[in-house]
Image (cartoon, grey):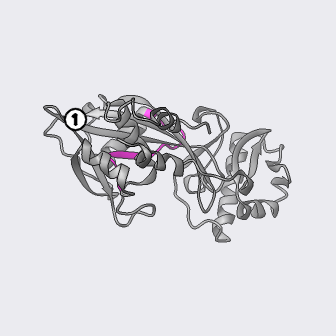
Amino acid sequence: MKLQGYQRHIDRLNEWNRDNFKPLYFDSHLVGYLKQPVCSFLKSRSDLFSVNERGVSLNPQFNSFEQRSEILDEVVDGLVESSVMTHRHGERYPVTHADRDSALATIDRAAAAYFGLRAYGQHLNGYVRDGSELLLWIARRSADRRVFPDHLDNMVAGGLPHDISLADNLHKECQEEASVPSHLVAQAVPIGAITYCTETPVGLKPDTLYCYDLELPSDFVPYNSDGEVAEFMLLPIEEVAERVANSDDFKPNCNLVVIDFLVRHGIINPETPGYLKLINGLHEKL
């Protein structure tokens, strides 16, 4: 087995050019990176931000969580009104310099990439054992999804808003996306996290995905209740591996979650050249 088909997904999600961005600071803490359109808008708001060659800083008199969050809401409104941003999402994401528990403010989820903020998500692999065969539940995203419509996805995957625990958010996502009952969600095994940093047309996505495995009974069939999934398919792990390696059928970051699953379940042989590079690439420093 050659690993280039897997490695290309990791490489794509870790491509960004630092020269395209200015760093964003809150109280000397690096919290994000900005492309020129957002920088230009913030430069017009010198009452709120200082912009120079070194970067962009929120003016230090705004030093409370509430003040910073209100200012970011005002800025996001302006970015939407000026068509730099296309929409608001409605969920609140943390603005942090370390981890999600040390938030300095919150911001609308749709603005996270525009500000190059660390964002967090949860992805769950739902799998079934049938004798010696390993099968993985795969979702197909609805055709009306704003991002990557009709692409394949992990059985459960969603963003992690501010001010909700990992356990509570996982239960919510499992029930909304796949109608997994609470007693099964409680059996999900946290198996680590994946990190990547990728440049997009609007900004930067330095993302962290908390990952979980859940072995499901053979008679369980996921059912979507929020309209975000068109169908679920129970596929042999060999077919899933082949589609990841040889196609772009999956939403990009879901490829990394599947690759991690393949490594941990021994589908990818550790004697294959490039094995350690593959593993290290799933945990890029943000």
Instruction: Please determine whether, in this image, residue 213 is positioned above or below residue 232.
Output: above
Q: Secondary structure at mark 1?
A: loop
Q: Position of residue 182 (x, y in %)?
A: 28, 34
Q: Is residue 115 left or right of residue 178?
A: right
Q: What quarter of the picture does the C terminus occupy?
A: top right
Query: For residue 90: magenta?
Result: no
For label 1, the crowd category at 10 Å Cα-Cα, with few meaning under 14, some 14 to 19 and many 20 or more, is: many
- On the question of residue 179 being in view, the answer is no
Instruction: Please determine whether, in this image, residue 86 is positioned above or below residue 199.
Output: below
Q: Position of residue 106 (x, y in %)?
A: 62, 46
Residue 236 in which image quadrant: top left
Question: Label 1 belongs to which residue?
Answer: 216
User: What count of labels does the image hold?
Assistant: 1
Q: Residue at point 55% right, 43% down?
A: 196
Callout 1 amino acid: Leu
Q: Residue at point 52% right, 55% down?
A: 90
Q: Residue at point 36% right, 59% down?
A: 151
Q: Position of residue 177 (x, y in %)?
A: 32, 49
Q: What quarter of the picture does the N terminus occupy?
A: top left
Query: For residue 163: magenta?
Result: yes
Between 223 and 283, the one lying in front of the other is 283
Q: Which residues are magenta?
A: 152-166
- On the question of residue 102 being in view, the answer is yes
Q: Residue at point 80% right, 38% down?
A: 28
Q: Position of residue 267 (x, y in %)?
A: 31, 35
- The residue at the far bottom in this view is 82
Q: Is residue 72 left or right of residue 55?
A: left
Residue 66 in which image quadrant: top right
Q: Is residue 210 left or right of residue 56?
A: left
Between 17 and 226, the one lying in front of the other is 17
Q: Is residue 51 left or right of residue 259?
A: right
Between 258 and 242, the one lying in front of the other is 242
